[in-house]
Image (spheres, rainbow, N blue to C red):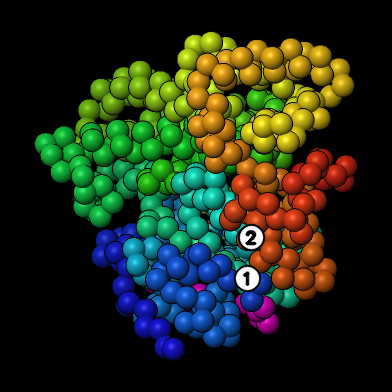
Amino acid sequence: MRVVFPPNSRFRQLGDDFWQEVDTTPLANPTLIDLNPSGAALLGLQEDDLSPDRWRELLNGQLYFGGQTPMASCYGGHQFGFWAGRLGDGRAHILGERNGYECQLKGSGQTRYSRMGDGRAVLRSTLREYLISEYMHALGIPTTRSLGLVGSDEPVYRETVETGAMMIRLSPSFIRFGTFEYYDVPGKQEQLARLLNFVLVEYYPECDGDHRVRDFFESVSRKTATLMAQWMAYGFCHGVMNTDNMSILGLTIDYGPYGFLEEYNPAHVCNHSDHEGRYSYENQPAVALWNLQRLATALHDHLSVEDVHAWLQSEFMTQYRDHLRELMHARFGLPNTEAAARTIEQAFEWMAHQVDHNRFLYALSQDGNLDPTLHVPHTLVERVTAWLVDYYRIRQEGDPLASQTLMQAKNPKYVLKNWIAQTAIDRCLNSDDSGFVAQLRRVLQAPFDEHPDMEPYAQNTPEWGRHLVVSCSS
Ligand code: AMP
Ligand code: MG
């Protein structure tokens, strides 16, 4: 069946102040590593709507949507606290939009915005982004999604020689806080107003009253606070929370050196290049607030920055904490009471540096079938056993059956740890074993379910995988 892609994307309508039309540069000898049927379904497509060869061509930038030249988008951003000027898609192309999703190819060659970069992405980071996008979605955490990826034998030079890869990611929009910041300079206020109007009309149509810009800003802020609560509840560290990596839709975007906490350690820094620990796990909500302040400042012509900054100071952390509390009470299966909150707080005290909270909570959610104390060191067993007595008493005060159902929907058996992503990378690189990627992707898309063949990936991190280093290099 021949699929006709619509010839346009909403983003194109913004005008060429916002993008460069530029051809992709396909990789030599591409191989289709995986096509994600759930990603295709978002576009209203089925896997067999295109032959494997056509999918491979699409994912390798050889087949454009509707025959239009792709676009690289322009944006700026604060990187590690400092204004970095113009950034933009230096290695990505928007191919077009279908079914409300923009299709962006990443790793697809140089653009006007490449600066000193080669326009490429390596297989290692592409596969990591491909897998985590589907995993976050399965956890219920807003994120860009994955359509598929290709590998190649084309050398790409990073710290060592790696190979190039490309993936298509999907999102209603890839507009970032940094897109607004870029146009906040004298002479570009007309473009900024155009961008603002576009985002309001297309993505925030509910904000249409007299205070529509302020309503829009508060909505972005609420979505971001919710997102931070979700990241924190699951021990997710993004690693590079620059303002160019903050989605205007409140999605997790631009996965790089991300990671999940192994032992609960609030000061954990997952990005080896982040020497100051600016983007440590515990700093993430405060950084999100700082990033929202940058967005508010860029909107100074359209709202009172002073008022908004005051509103952010009083509201953002409250919204974040309320949502986090709700999530943690659900994960622990406890009613949202003060006594339960104290019990959860105590748990995080003994967990610190010693216990993987995701594994412990999964065991706890299996009520009786798994002993949660198996996941704590010997020295803690007595303390945790006493804690469990208290815990079960408080749980009885709520509705234990309902709470178990909720717990099982909130506590995944499988967590995408670095060692698991690394296993997929190694198998892909060493043996052309791309079937494993599909198998792992299916597990990550249903992480609450049993997957008997993949049981080892629900177990403890093996020794070799405990201290993997992940950096900005990608
Ligand atoms: P990231 O750290 O991936 O969010 O990228 C930050 C900025 O650097 C974005 O503007 C990217 O497009 C650009 N960039 C990163 N890597 C490359 C590369 N290899 N070639 C060109 N641009 C790149
Ligand atoms: Mg980025």
Horizontal arrangement in the rendering, residue 460 relative to residue 203 (left or right): right
Q: Magenta segment, principal secondary structure?
A: loop
Which residue is depicted at the point 37% across and 83% down? 4
x and y percentages locating residue 377 in the rendered image: 84, 24
x and y percentages locating residue 267 in the rendered image: 67, 25
Residue 22 lies in the magenta-colored region: yes
Asked if the residues shown at circle 2 and circle 1 are in contact, with their CB atoms under 8 angstroms apart, the answer is yes
Q: Quadrant of residue 68?
A: bottom left
Disc 2 designates what residue?
A: 441
x and y percentages locating residue 299 in the rendered image: 27, 37
Mark 2 vs mark 1, CA separation in Å: 9 Å
Q: Quadrant of residue 461?
A: top right
Query: Is 313 rendered above or below residue 207?
Result: above
Instruction: Kindly state the secondary structure of the residue where label 1 is placed.
Output: strand
Residue type (three-letter) at the residue carrying disc 1: Asp
Q: Is residue 191 visible?
A: no
Residue type (three-letter) at the residue carrying disc 2: Arg
Query: Is 21 rendered above or below residue 14?
Result: below
Q: Nearer the viewer, residue 364 or 82?
A: 364
Residue bounds of the magenta highlight: 21-31
Residue 437 lies in the magenta-colored region: no
Query: Is 226 rendered above or below residue 448?
Result: above
Disc 1 designates what residue?
A: 34
Q: Earlier in the sequence, mark 2 or mark 1?
A: 1
- Which residue is most to the bottom? 1
Q: Is residue 340 visible?
A: yes
